[in-house]
Amino acid sequence: GAVVSQHPSRVICKSGTSVKIECRSLDFQATTMFWYRQFPKQSLMLMATSNEGSKATYEQGVEKDKFLINHASLTLSTLTVTSAHPEDSSFYICSAPGASTDTQYFGPGTRLTVL
Amino acid sequence: QKEVEQDPGPLSVPEGAIVSLNCTYSNSAFQYFMWYRQYSRKGPELLMYTYSSGNKEDGRFTAQVDKSSKYISLFIRDSQPSDSATYLCAMSAMDSSYKLIFGSGTRLLVRP
């Protein structure tokens, strides 16, 4: 199957700082990528759809100015958590649609802890 | 009412048992159905993907879709301790721009 990577896998930061998370499709191109958030023992919540060359589409209730998304190339999308607060601590996962199927392949996730 | 309902478990079974995991959904527009396996602190891994009603088998895994009842299942035969994980069902509608709707996930524990 298609491979999606994320970096970093884990990050700890102080409250008020900004954190950037990268999502890369390693062996295929992705004009669309998705960013999810997952709290412990809960399912994935879609935050936004990242579109190469255009603005991201955010789900209802997700702050655009807080979660900045940039899809700079066909293999890279970045999520920047700005002015992070402890309540932003979560597991962030990206995904990209496969080339030949109507499904998605997920990255390994990034665990963000805001102190 | 959630669009996709899934029993969160946990479900505990002895090694070698047949496991049945299920989801129900309310949106008749859903056409694509997937099962993902997620180990603790890892990203979801695609296990099975089905489009039409019926069964699809892959090794010890069988995915079943009943669109008339809006019910999907995943069966795991000869379960192993390494199958212990959270299993998430996911589905999407045609022309949904690949947007997936997930169930809450079922935690499975296979006891040696």
Image (cartoon, helix red, strand yellow):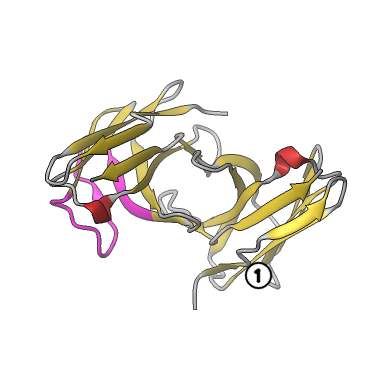
Position of residue A107 in the picture relative to residue B64 (left or right): left
Q: Judge left or right: residue A58 versus residue A106.
A: left
> Could you say where residue B79 lies in the image, as x and y percent from the top left?
81, 45
Q: Amino acid at mark 1?
A: Lys
**Front one among B49 and B89:** B89
Which residue occupies 34% across, 26% down?
A75
User: Residue at point 16% right, 51% down?
Assistant: A66
Can residue B21 be seen from the camera position used here? yes
Residue at the (80%, 55%) spot, across then down: B13
Which residue position holds label 1?
A: B70
- Identify the residue at image location x=31%, y=42%: A112
| Residue A56 picture location, percent across and down | 23, 46
Mark 1 neighbour density, 10 Å: few (under 14) some (14–19) many (20 or more) = some
Compared with residue A45, is residue A95 higher up or lower down, i.e. above or below?
above
- Percent x, y for residue A19? 20, 37
Lateral position of residue B102 relative to residue A29, left or right: right
Principal SS element in the magenta part? loop
Q: Position of residue A83 (x, y in %)?
A: 13, 46
Q: Chain of mark 1?
A: B
Q: Quadrant of the C terminus of chain B?
A: top right
Residue A103 left/right relative to B107: left
**Magenta span:** A46-66
